[in-house]
Amino acid sequence: MDTFLFTFLTIAYTTLSVLAIRVVRNYKVLSTLLLLPVIVGLIYDNGIISAGRFIGEGPLLEGLNLARFWIHAFFTPLLVLYAWKTLEQANVQWASKNWVRISAFLLTAVLILVELFTVVIGLNIEARLEYGVLSYSSTEPSSGPPIMVLVVSVVLLASSLIIWRRQKWIWFFVGSLLMIVGSAIQLPVNSGAITNFFELILISSLLGTAYFQGKVYKSLKGG
């Protein structure tokens, strides 16, 4: 069952990537350019998981899965820059200040380094077959979400509240909140793909926010 679910997620993210490119082309929304690498990373992540059984256990699948952790470390922190750019596009005055811009880039860099040194570098992974899906995951027991994920989640949630108040756009907040709730609560479902669906909701809300801001900007310009 999970093979089907992860395949569906791969297709869904591929569709979102096409829509994101269209948003960039039609509305010139720069925040979408920061979201695109994250979407591409999720296409790879879900694609490798869904294909695990067909590739088979061995060095090839192990290497492909190890790349998932590196991609996650480098791409997910870009959501901090997405959040900052979204505030800037909403004409939040302090978001355009140099110290805020520099802080956003510094925080992104720090989160990448934190993820690399606390999770990725020296990571040992082993093959696991769960719910019909073959993948490689850490040999160390999980003690909760990594620091990087927690910080990114807080930044997105805080930014979404500002966007909701300033532009009356609630869906950024809804996506961010559901992602946090979905990660914190263990649902009684026999599947390893549930959290990934909350990720899909989040990314969809972020792309929807970019599209909304693009339409607002275009209408103000008389387009």
Image (cartoon, helix red, strand yellow):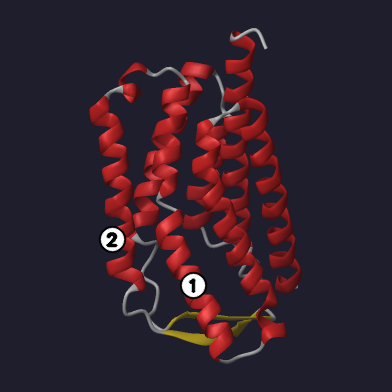
Image point (31%, 54%), residue name? 111
Q: Vertical placement of 148 versus 210: above or below? A: below
Quadrant of the rendered image containing residue 135: bottom right
Image point (61%, 91%), residue name? 57
Nearer to the camera, 211 or 184: 211
Numbered mark located on residue 67 in the image: 1
- The amino acid at mark 2 is Val
Nearer to the camera, 151 or 211: 211
Of marks 1 and 2, the one in the foreground: 1
Quadrant of the rendered image containing residue 206: top right
Quick check: can you spot residue 162? no
**Mark 2 surroundings within 10 Å by alpha-carbon count, few (fewer than 14), some (14 through 19), many (20 or more):** some
Image point (47%, 17%), residue name? 166
Numbered mark located on residue 114 in the image: 2
In the image, farthest residue toward the bottom? 58
**7 left or right, relative to 169:** right
